Image: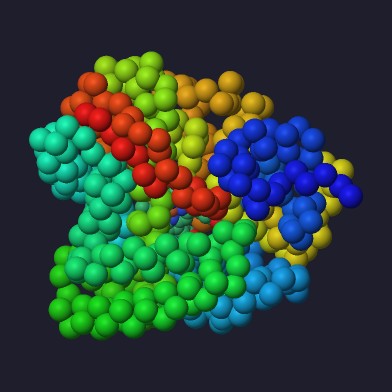
Amino acid sequence: MTELLFNPFDPAFRANPYPFYDVLRERAPVYFSPFETVVLSRYDDIAVTLRSSDFSRDIEKHANAPTSPIANRRRERGGDDSGKSILNLDPPDHTRLRRLVSLAFTPSAIERLRPRVQQLVDDVLDVAAERGSMELIDELAFPMPFQVISDLLAMPTERSVELREWSQHLTASLEPTADDDDMDRAEAAIGHFLPYLNGIIEDRRRNLGDDLLSALIQVEESGDRMTTQELIAFVLLLYVAGHETTVNLIGNGALALLRNRDQLVMWRDNPALDNVVVDELLRYDGPVQLTVRVPIRPVNYGETTVQPGTVVMTVLGAANHDPAMFDEPHALQVDRPNAHRHLAFAAGVHYCLGVSLAKLETQVAIGSLIRRFPNLDLAGEPGWRDRLTIRGVDRLPLAL
Ligand code: HEM
């Protein structure tokens, strides 16, 4: 039997995938795994794949007949195109929607949020300062981005506990290790989310404001508008992205700095680094470890050909630790000159829409934390969510 080089079912792999990625990149950079996928781990192969029009992001539509019952259920859950978010659509449908949402989701609109983000962070740090300790994830890394996305969309926050749970169930179903129970929970979460969002959107149509959701409802180009279904799918994606990614970047980033104190001090004492550090945190231990594409025509990686319909896993975390791209890739270097070349936000047409927001929130949260508390330290072992697709710290006790 061939050696198993990519095994998300191995707890040691999920706990620290980077040494496994190194072996994979060295020994089988285009790895035909027994899980019916081809796993890519080299920076160049991944960058080319993400930018290529030879691939689709619509796995349900283009992947070969799925072999596992879970893959089958995923396919069924994909349904018809009308329920898909921009993340799962290909051009030209993707192009149309991306243009519409970009009209409302501009970098200048995000930069205007800076004072609000700073205020939310300062409020949390004031309370923690009194106590002399804090649990970073529950007190800051989760509630702040959640409040910001809720503010942006003018969403009510009183059901935040349920919303967080639904989001977690949805992302759990994206894991390569998802089982029937995960799929059941994800379906139940969708069943809650859809009527909830539908109600809010219907209400907002009658009471437009100056929020992002109102802007999305009104956005129009050449007579084109978003349908209610498109709006729901997009808001759902924003919610999940808002809940499940930035929280991990703040957690993973803070932990990386605490474990590399010379780098923490270098950033703390150099405000000029404020705009570049977050790229290195994303490169070093980004929240989204992998994503998938499926070729729609035969593609070649060197001598190896991958046939249409084969699911190709682009391991972003492996690309970001490729020594062919980054010197000493396993070292955290907050002034790394080419850190911005990381692929933590993917690349090509699906390049993350939330980049400015995620960077702003992380820079303000961690920057304020390390500057306000010079003696900041870990106050216990971090806890990890046992996940790979979206991987991160879920408990980080700090002494201030
Ligand atoms: C550190 C935080 C984040 C990371 C690491 C991240 C990562 C990613 C990645 C890797 C993709 C592309 C997936 C693929 O190509 O298959 C993506 C897409 C996307 N992200 Fe993010 N994301 C983050 C935060 C956010 C936030 C805060 C938002 C919005 C509030 C957001 C909204 C989106 C949207 C709408 C897409 C789909 C874009 C498209 O298909 O055109 N993300 N993100």
Q: Image height check: is 99 above or below 266?
A: below
Res 135 seen here: yes
Res 54 seen here: no
At a point 31% along the width and 31% down the height, the residue shown is 379
Lateral position of residue 346 relative to residue 221, left or right: right
At a point 89% along the width and 50% down the height, the residue shown is 1
Q: Image height check: is 209 above or below 282?
A: below
Q: Residue 129, how many percent across, how many down? A: 14, 34
Q: Residue furthest right?
A: 1
Q: Image height check: is 11 above or below 126?
A: below
Lateral position of residue 70 relative to residue 208, left or right: right
Q: Of residues 379 and 49, which is closer to you in this image?
A: 379
Location of the C terminus by quadrant is: top left
At a point 21% along the width and 82% down the height, the residue shown is 203
Picture quarter with ligand 1: bottom left
Q: Residue 243, how many percent across, how many down? A: 35, 57
Q: Of residues 72 and 97, which is closer to you in this image?
A: 72
At a point 36% along the width and 44% down the height, the residue shown is 395
- Picture quarter containing residue 229? bottom left
- Picture quarter containing residue 61? bottom right
Q: Of residues 213 and 6, which is closer to you in this image?
A: 6
